Amino acid sequence: MKNFALRGALSLRRRVAGFVLATVGLPALSCTLRLLGDDESITIDVLAFQLLVVVVALVGGIWPALICAVGAGALLDLFFVAPFYSVTIADPLHLVALVIFVVVAVLVSIVVDQAARRSLAATRSAAESETLADIAGSVLRGQDALQALVSRLRESFGMTSVILRAKGETLYSAIDSAIADDADIETTFPIGQNGSLYLRGTELAASDRRILGAFLSQIEAVLRQRDLASEADRMRPVAEADRLRTALLAAVGHDLRRPLAAATAAVTSLRSMEVTLTEADKRELLEAAEVSLDSLAQLVTKLLDASRLQAGVLGVELAATAVDGLVLGALDELGLSPGEVQLELGETVPVLADGVLLQRVIVNLLANALRFAPPGVPPVIATIECADHVQLRVIDSGPGIPADRREDIFVAFQRLGDTDNTSGLGLGLALSKGFVEAMGGTLEAEDTPGGGLTMMVELAVHP
């Protein structure tokens, strides 16, 4: 409904017009029939007056039509039924005809009035449906639901202004100062527990309250939804922190138990007096304890690095750093021979980096590539100098990662987007990205041509 004001069935203006038509039409029609008719034209006279009653009913409804019918009957008796100019009727048949005329006029006026009311009710229903459809369409098109409701409410009822307030502040308002009137009435409707809707304009008819109730219900529902969304946004960081805390505890619990159990078993066996151990057995147990304690040290180091990154207090000492030397150091740290990794180290200038952090990045990336590289296809480490940057690429030919999940691998406690506790904390790539960014560089994941994953570290050339 476009600019359709929701009002009663018949307006005061129409009823007044009906009364005016009856008041003017009765004497005018009487004079015309008296001038043009004769004593034998009573049938035409009755039909003419009945037509006038129907017209009055169409214009003003039942009450003007009833008064017109009674007036028409009196005029017919006075001027068109003998004896003339008196309220007496000589022929009983004329009396019966006059009574039937009045009854028919009343019935016709009632039917016409009901038809007019039903037509207006249908128009009202169509207007209400269009109003609600327009509101829904505004929301679906991305418009603010509350603003759409408030604006449409003002247009539908022809109000001067509609203001929505909640918790002491104005949320939305729709004002048309062009139709402001000093006689405007302000009405307040409560919405929910803390909201109010202020309508200023003409007084609402009783028939308008149903569609107004629909507006109020929708506004209240949207306000409730906004409150729930706001509460969800407020709780989301807490939920995320709880999720990370749970993942950390689960992962740390698993990773701590495994090396601790191995080290404890080795030390317990060495101290046992009930079992006689050979020198080879002792060396094997000591080696197992050493590996387990080394694993614990790496775990604690990663957790400390993660906490420093999160707190923003990671110590970074940038200096001229040779990438090829750090690559060889990473191979030694992982205990790899040159045949287990394919090296394609080009001639590059030193980069601006922290040597300790960069070597740990290379170790993390290379260990990850070795884990997913297929047998017989060693990972590749390549360096390329590009203008004022040097690229370090760690390339594997493994299963790769879908494009829409690549960012997940840089999230703490994630492996391919899953919180799996059986293969480490999942901090390696998250720490590597944090280290590289702390040195002013970037770490990105790309597809390897032919299948696999390429991790590309880009660092600035030392001035």
Image (spheres, rainbow, N blue to C red):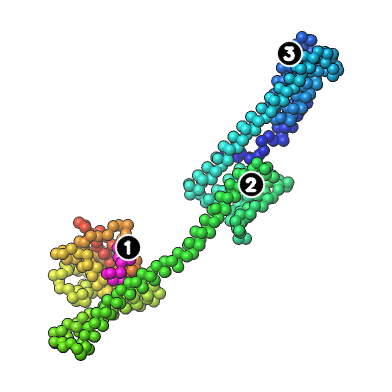
Residue 417: which disc? 1
- Location of the C terminus by quadrant is bottom left
Which class describes the residues within 10 Å of circle 3: few (<14), some (14-19), or many (20+)?
few
Residue 311, above or below 280: above
Residue 122 image position (x, y, % from top left): 59, 34
Tell whether position 461 is magenta.
Answer: no
Q: Nearer the viewer, mark 2 or mark 3?
A: 3
Closer to the camera in the image, 184 or 390: 184
Alpha-carbon span between mark 1 and mark 3: 94 Å
Q: Which residue is mark 3?
A: 43
Tell whether position 423 is magenta.
Answer: yes
Residue 258, above or below 138: below
Closer to the camera in the image, 409 or 263: 263
Q: Report helix, strand or loop for mark 2.
A: loop
Closer to the camera in the image, 180 or 451: 451
Alpha-carbon span between mark 1 and mark 2: 54 Å
Q: Are marks 1 and 2 in contact (CB under 8 Å)?
A: no
- Location of the N terminus by quadrant is top right
State which region is magenta. 415-425
Camera sees residue 331: yes
Residue 97 placement: quadrant:
top right
Residue 27: which disc? none
Camera sees residue 150: no
What type is the residue that disc 1 sits on?
Answer: Gly
Q: Residue at x 37, y 75 (%)?
A: 307
Residue 106, above or below 229: above
Q: Earlier in the sequence, mark 2 or mark 3?
A: 3
Residue 333 image position (x, y, % from top left): 21, 76
Residue 176: which disc? 2
What type is the residue that disc 2 sits on?
Answer: Asp
Residue 331 image position (x, y, % from top left): 19, 74
The majority secondary structure of the magenta stretch comes to loop
